[in-house]
Amino acid sequence: MQYLFLVLSSTLFLLLTYTTSFNELTINDSLLILFVFCVVISVELVITIMISKFHAIQKNLITLFILINIISFHALFIEELVYLKIYQQVLLLLINYFVIFTFISIVNENKLFSKIINLVILIAICGTLYNSYIKQTNNLLSVIPTSGTHSENIRLINFTSTPNVYFVAFDALIPQSIFNMYFTDSSAPFHQVFNKNFSSFTNFFTDAAPTKPSLNALLALDPDYYNNHKETLFNGTAPSPFFEVFKHNGYEVSTAYWGTYFGEKQGPFVDNYNIGDNTEGICQFLNQNLKSYTLYGYCEYKYFLETLLLIPQEHTVTLQDYVITKLYDDISINTPHVSLSYIFSPGHAPIKQKLTGDELDEYTKSYIEYSKYTVEHIHKLMKFIDEKDPTAILFVFGDHGTFTSNDTDKLTDTKYFIHDRYAVYGGIYPKDRCHKYFTEQNNKKYTTIIQASQMIFKCLSNGQDIFINQKEWNHVDYEQYLYE
């Protein structure tokens, strides 16, 4: 029964990873990781059976195999565990080793307990699979509102003008004042471009962080609705109140990111879900220092396996250029268009890991270097508007801050934590677009991404408000953390 315990316990933790990361898994990932898992378990079973005569060694080895499987297939995905201090990690490993060893000892000595524990794990596996199925299907709402949006706090409004509207989020795009406040340089290359060409908001904040919560919060508009559909709006698995307002006014709606980070499949509630031919999937955002250990190094030899299985890998454009390319592809003369796109540039620091001293200096250099590419993308966006869509509205914003802080700073240095996570850049191009409503909003003490979108809705509808009951997104009073 100890062999069954090895298989079932390892399977459970692999499934836990799958259910928490299913949006990031491609079909190739799912099949190849399952293949790796089967190979690993098979090798472990063969080894443990071969040494079955040496009971003490076998018991310790099975314990070690289970512990390594849990770490490689699941624990390395949990950032809170990865960034624990070394002594805490060692202590946690010893405790888990003792617990697993104890279970195996009891399994070997007590047949009844063995059957019970394996049955419990099997039930947990079935429950995990069922919850995964519910999670992926319960957002397909069958009841379509006869009036209004799916959120009881967001109303439908009628636009008085219908230009194309482009919402483009850049990763960790922060304002010059924040950069000057916390980094060794006074500005990044893109700040000059924004200062010259954009109407920039002052004291601008994101409503949620990191990327997925930030962008899905924008699409939800309402925190109550967001809590039920946290990661299912960008790919259209669930209806977005944000897009519903545009759809009500005859818009075609699209989202774009070169990759499967927001989900591999398009749902029924967006017209276009553009993810291109990037099939990196779960490997795209793995911790680079742990890539060789996570999933038994699957990402290191993924492309070898795909080549072996004759799966093509042809990337026609770069990650950032893909979004620009899709803007040209999706522009329509007869139908107004709104899109939300995400560009991974200039990029945040390793999440949960506080940067100080040399590490902060190194990240600053990296941020400035990658910002040069950010400038190129912004110029391409401006060129697109000027040459192809001169009546359009372009709203560029940061999805979240640079994440150079860690969670403990929330208590010990709250101002730094809030600025680092939530203070972002936001601006409108061209400068004269929605000027009246921009000025009205920017005269307030601060603006969030959702409030900026509310401003754009007012601009399109001659002042109508989409909110029936506008609610706060978090417990942070941004008025206490103004930086400009």
Image (tube, rainbow, N blue to C red):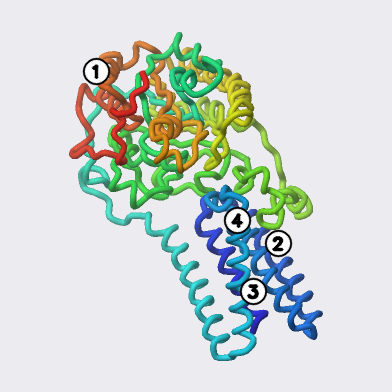
Earlier in the chain: of badge 1 and badge 3, it is 3
Q: Image check: 408 left or right of 201? A: right
Please report the residue visible at 30 percent of the width from the left and 24 percent of the height from the top: 446
For residue 328, above or below residue 42: above
- Residue where numbered disc 1 is placed: 440
- Residue where numbered disc 4 is placed: 89
**Do tag 3 and tag 4 residues touch (Cβ < 8 Å)?**
no
Is residue 217 something one can see in this rendering? yes
For residue 266, above or below residue 15: above
Give the class, few, some or many, for how many residues have Cα within 10 Å of label 4's Cα (few <14, many ≥20): some
- Residue where numbered disc 2 is placed: 36
Between marks 3 and 4, how big is the CA–CA gap?
25 Å
- Residue where numbered disc 3 is placed: 7
Please report the residue visible at 31 percent of the width from the left and 37 percent of the height from the top: 476
Please report the residue visible at 35 percent of the width from the left and 43 percent of the height from the top: 240
**Do tag 2 and tag 4 residues touch (Cβ < 8 Å)?**
no
Please state the horizontal and vertical placement of residue 135, each as a whole percent of the image: 42, 59
Amino acid under label 1? Glu
Amino acid under label 3? Val
